[in-house]
Image: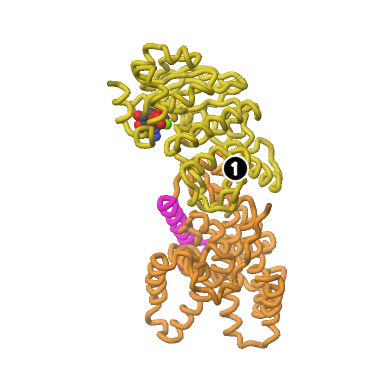
Amino acid sequence: MTRFSKFTALFLLAAVPFLDLPDYYMHVLILILIWGFVYTGWSIMGRFGLVSLGHGAFLGIGGYTVGMLWNFYGITPWLGIPIALILATIVALIVGYPCFQFRIIGHYFALVTLALAEVVRLVIIGMRDYTGGSLGMTPQRYGEGMSVYAFQFVEKDYFYVIVLLSWVFGIWVWNLVDGSMARYSMEAISDDEDASASVGINVTREKLKITILSAWLTAFGGVLYGQYQMYLNPDTIAGISVSLQIVFASIVGGMYVALGPTVGAVITILLSESLRILVGVELAGLDGTIYGIMLILFIIFLPRGILGSGWAKPLEILRFPKDKPG
Amino acid sequence: MLIVKKLSKHFKGFVAVDSVSFEVHEGELVGLIGPNGSGKSTVFNLISGNLSLTSGSIRFDGQELAGLPSHRVCHQGIARTFQIPRPFRKLDLLENVAVSAFFGSAVPIRREEAWKRAKEALGIVKLSGDSNVDVARLGASGLKKLELARALSTRPRLLLADESLGGLDETEMEQAGEMLEHIRSEMGITIIWVEHIMGILMKVVDRVIVLDHGEKISEGLPNEVADDPKVIEVYLGDKNEVGHKAADTTVESLQSSDYISRKQC
Ligand SMILES: Nc1ncnc2c1ncn2[C@@H]1O[C@H](COP(=O)(O)OP(=O)(O)OP(=O)(O)O)[C@@H](O)[C@H]1O
Ligand SMILES: [Mg+2]
């Protein structure tokens, strides 16, 4: 993408609130941007073979930490967010350090992270006196529901601007990693850990860095989601199913390309919304089933995702070129 | 420079390296030889930290290396090559070396500097032609050179070259020997060289260490070792055959145990 087309695209996206779109369309756009941001955060590590099936844990930590600090102590999300990020870091370290130190990779790593997602979900349910358990919880509304201090914006136009900025930030971080030495070290590590260590790469540290970065973005995505929906539920924000949805969307969109995960978000959200409208809520699990089937087909036939694959030439424009130094 | 004392490695009861001691002095080019499975690569893996040792001590400039992870050993100034090349397949040739230069440097360096060092290292091993080439397109000799370039780009003081020049033709083997000689004399890098083909190794090394079944059975100047009856028995066979072996040793004979049995009869 050229600089010009980048700015044009951003300008168009920034102009959306002035279009006076119906609330429902704003709602869908906001969801796409929030999930696009989350999926981008996941793929920052997923693209290097660090396939986490437990990123729902970080979403949950983000959403619940901020919501609970606000409800019980009146702590503003501006303080709650850094606290949530610190918690996400601690959890990433507790799970990541032993995994990386003991060379738990591939499927085994995926299984450990799968357990993580479930543990966080169960902890939220177990602390039902504080979290509302599986009934979920609602952050207390502040005044009219429009407050920078409380990070609450009932007006969709405002929330849209916030998630747009967050999403742009996420893409910027993705590209930053893509152009950094960390990418080279992670590509080397994902290929051969012993050989990487022999040329001086601190394998554990490099993996932890990328994992923590990914955890931060995802936890912040959880905050956005919670503050937008003004409702948190352990099943939608912390469990295995949301974790798998993250993986599914990122793979389908193309996790090796900056905008791939966002394309994944467009697909999953349009799919679940149209299923909801066409089929109704009786078949609530249907989108999950379709995701599953699509995922299998993609892994077999299009492992690099829609944006990452050769036949998606018309979409080529959505790729960011890779700058190579030297 | 390097002092190895009573180094042992057991793999679940199997003794791969058995109380081996030796020293390497600054500026030396030492050959480490022995039949297949005698523990040469294992010794390298122990020094480089790729394997943890069962017992013993490895001192490099007075510092104990035992227990250090590989990346720290690299930062201490020890680089290694792998007998079977292990390129990073997702990176191109230049990136392979640049990532090594960047992360292998003992002190943090700038990115541009890493790319500069990578180009230099590729120049030394004579691979500078098309540096953006996909490593999958490198042949056996190219991959060996890539291994060497990666190791050199970290600016080591001691190089562990696990060559066993399998897969190379005779001129390539000669060149590889000359290259190591050049690296030692021009760049002042101390080298331990593992090699099967005696004809080439004996010509360039200062000293030879011989392993058999994990034990050190001989050590000395090339001609002393070649005359040592124990070495002749397990490895060299009739020493008059040494030169001849260099010529007819090929990949298969290097890798197969058939090679040992032929030498032993
Ligand atoms: N990771 C391992 N696990 C178990 N046994 C091993 C391992 N690595 C090496 N060995 C065994 O240790 C012995 C020594 O192997 P090593 O690779 O050091 O021999 P070598 O002298 O390098 O042989 P070659 O000349 O064929 O390269 C062999 O019998 C080998 O099978
Ligand atoms: Mg070997």
Which corner quadrant of the image does residue A67 belong to? bottom right
- Per the picture, the main secondary structure of the magenta-coloured stretch is helix
Residue A46: x and y in percent read 51, 58
Measuring from the top left, give residue B11's x and y in whole percent.
37, 29
Residue beneath the point at 58% across and 39% down: B125
Tell whether A150 sits left or right of A301.
Answer: right
Chain B palette colour: yellow
Amino acid marked by disc 1: Ser
**Percent of width and height locating residue A250:** 50, 66
Query: B214 and A178: which one is in front?
Result: B214
Question: Where is B71 relative to A250, above or below?
Answer: above
Residue designated by label 1: B100
In this rendering, position of residue A23 left or right of residue B109: left
Crowding at dot 1, Cα within 10 Å, few <14 / some 14-19 / many 20+, comes out as many
- In the figure, the shade used to draw chain A is orange
Q: Which quadrant holds residue A12?
A: bottom right
Q: Residue at x 51, y 43 (%)?
A: B142
Report the magenta residues as a range: A106-134
Asked if residue A10 is positioned above or below residue B167 in the image, the reply reads: below
- Quadrant of the image containing the C terminus of chain B: top left
